[in-house]
Image (cartoon, rainbow, N blue to C red):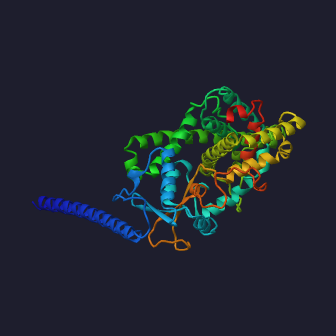
Amino acid sequence: MAGLWLGLVWQKLLLWGAASAVSLAGASLVLSLLQRVANYARKWQQMRPIPTVARAYPLVGHALLMKRDGREFFQQIIKYTEEYRHMPLLKLWVGPVPMVALYSAENVEVILTSSKQIDKSSMYKFLEPWLGLGLLTSTGNKWRSRRKMLTPTFHFTILEDFLDIMNEQANILVKKLEKHVNQEAFNCFFYITLCALDIICETAMGKNIGAQSNDDSEYVRAVYRMSEMIFQRIKMPWLWLDLCYRMFKEGWEHKKSLKILHTFTNNVIAERANEMNADEDCRGDGRGSALSKNKRRAFLDLLLSVTDDEGNRLSHEDIREEVDTFMFEGHDTTAAAINWSLYLLGSNPEVQKKVDQELDDVFGMFGPFTGSIVVLSPLQRCHCVVNSAMSRKAPPRDPFQYHPLCKASPIHSQANSNRLLLLCILTYLSFWKQSPNLFLQSYCLSVLVHVVLVTLILLLNQEVHTSSWLQ
């Protein structure tokens, strides 16, 4: 009898304990939600003085108004900034997060020249599943340490070894463009992007993926799809929570593409690491170097051998982060710069003729390009063209930069918000003394984006006359 009574008491205690635990968890959840709502209301009140483009809806903000298509969204932002150009700031709500858009050159300069503004916006977290915490997404001490380690690997002399690769891929590109000679106008950006992807992939990983020969390859499709999904997710706050994201079609596609990208990079890293180990074994046995016949060292090879101040090497995951970052940031930005340069040349026939003449003069003296950087040095007009294209109304492939607001910033709001630097808008606003639409190939000769210059020159140096397909 006593045992039965104790059993009943024990059951009641268990029920009371379970009920208490559920109540406590529920109370904690409600309290957390109330705190979030209170913070959201406080932000909303504090951000009221800053002008906004339209009425923002609770919880989702302006997300419902944002165009899904990248081109339409870009034009939408330009329209907003033109309408509010007399204001130094513009407010956009992306879900519960306020974005303070800066498109004044003076304000943007304060942010970009600050040595304290190295923190990354919360928006960068959507890149982390793919890129991890590499140079693009990391911050603080890890960013400083990683940058110090990787700085020696970003040297122009390393790219000189890949000039023949650039030349080879440029030849493939021109053969594709040849098919459109004397035909209707076409969009050449896709061709140029595939060419840039081939060049960057072989430069970064020492791997020829043949994107131009097989534009339907699994890896190429995954790169484009992943980039598109990340951009779309940033604009859709209802997809920010990972749990919710996995329940949608986009979440499944994201997981599938991520597996393809990481599997490819992991396999390449393992392959190159095995080759380097075999090379060390050969040298240790006195049989010479297996890799010495090929002097070209890809970015991945340098990552496998780089060490920090304490002599520690990067882990496999660290290397994958940087290689994926290099691929993501490298191919798209390079393709955009090349495409923009070619567009400006096609839009300015008189400049194109002068560039054509310079190419004929230089390569008529040196002969066909053989992969020597010395041959490219006399191409001063090409230098000017690329510099002008990069600085005059050039639409960057990464036209928006996100930075968190902090109290150390001269441009500070009391609300915890993010700065959205509209770098692309700076060249579209028409209050500059010189017209942003004017293409002046006689601008500065100093700063030169070498990859863009070399690839552009190699492209223009092919047998196809540029004017037949640029115009």
Quick check: 244 left or right of 279?
A: left
Residue at 60% x, 41% y: name it: 265
Quick check: 453 left or right of 100?
A: right
Q: Foreground: 324 or 169? A: 169
Q: Quadrant of residue 264?
A: top right
Quick check: 147 left or right of 61?
A: right
Q: Foreground: 349 or 92? A: 349
The reply to whether residue 94 is in sight is: yes
Residue at 14% x, 59% y: name it: 8
Q: Seen from this angle, which residue lies furthest right?
A: 365
Q: Tell me if residue 464 comes above or below residue 32 in the rendering.
A: above
Quadrant of the image for the C terminus?
top right
Q: Foreground: 313 or 297? A: 297
Q: In the image, residue 435 lies at what x, y percent?
A: 65, 55
Q: In the image, residue 129 lies at what x, y percent?
A: 51, 49
Residue at 30% x, 62% y: name it: 29
Q: In the image, residue 374 lies at what x, y percent?
A: 86, 44
